[in-house]
Image (cartoon, rainbow, N blue to C red):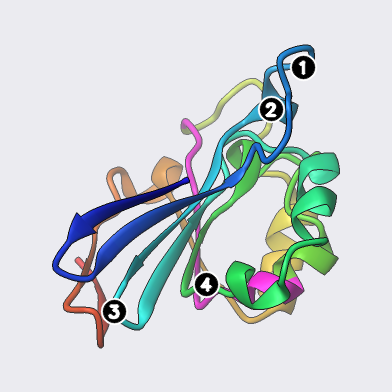
Amino acid sequence: MVINFGDGAKLTVLFPNQDVSNWETNRASIVAKLVYGDKSFLLTGDSPIKTENILLNLDKEILDSDVLKAGHHGSRTSTSLSFAEVVSPEYAVISAGKDNSYGHPHKEVLDILKKVGSKILSTAESGTIIFETDGKTLQLK
């Protein structure tokens, strides 16, 4: 499914691309890519590694993104090295509450994101994270 917002902005739903009505909720999370001009954002919801593996069967170029919203609050159940390498984000955003009882984000995920060269941003540390783009440049506000 593609939602065209006009003016060069579009959102492509990459997953689910199959019937997920009987799947566990996180595994059935919507994964979408927002593109505006040359800049892109991959939004992975709470998708676990099993869902990432399905996405890795798509054309790898479609996964390449400037910004990755890391899956499942930075849990070790998401954001595998192979997935992060294909996405190769300049920025990785982790949405997690400060001092949450789950220990998110997990060190393993932070290490993976550092290994692929991403600048890691966390709502636990920074609060609301805002990007601004004209389709050519990307700025963190």
Residue placed at 54% from the left, 30% from the top?
99
Crowding at dot 4, Cα within 10 Å, few <14 / some 14-19 / many 20+, comes out as many
Look at the numbered discs 2 and 1 and tell me whether their residues touch, using CB distance below 8 Å.
yes
Where is residue 25 shown, x and y percent of the image?
Answer: 68, 18
Dot in front, 2 or 4? 2
Instruction: Please name the amino acid that badge 2 sits on.
Output: Ala
Q: How many marks?
A: 4
Closer to the N terminus: mark 2 or mark 4? 2
Q: Which quarter of the rendered picture does the C terminus lie within?
A: bottom left
Q: Which mark is residue 37?
A: 3
Label 4 vs 3, first from the N-terminus: 3
Other-residue count near label 1 (Cα within 10 Å), few / some / many at <14 / 14–19 / ≥20: few
Q: Which residues are magenta?
A: 85-97
Looking at numbered disc 4 in the image, what kind of residue is underneath it? Ser
Q: Are marks 3 and 1 in contact (CB under 8 Å)?
A: no
Please say if the residues under marks 2 and 3 sit with CB atoms less than 8 Å apart: no
Circle 1: element type: loop
Q: Which residue is mark 1?
A: 24
Q: Which residue is mark 2?
A: 28
Which residue in the protein does label 4 denote? 65
Residue at (81%, 49%) from the top-left corner?
Answer: 54
- On the image, the x and y values in percent for residue 14 come to 59, 50
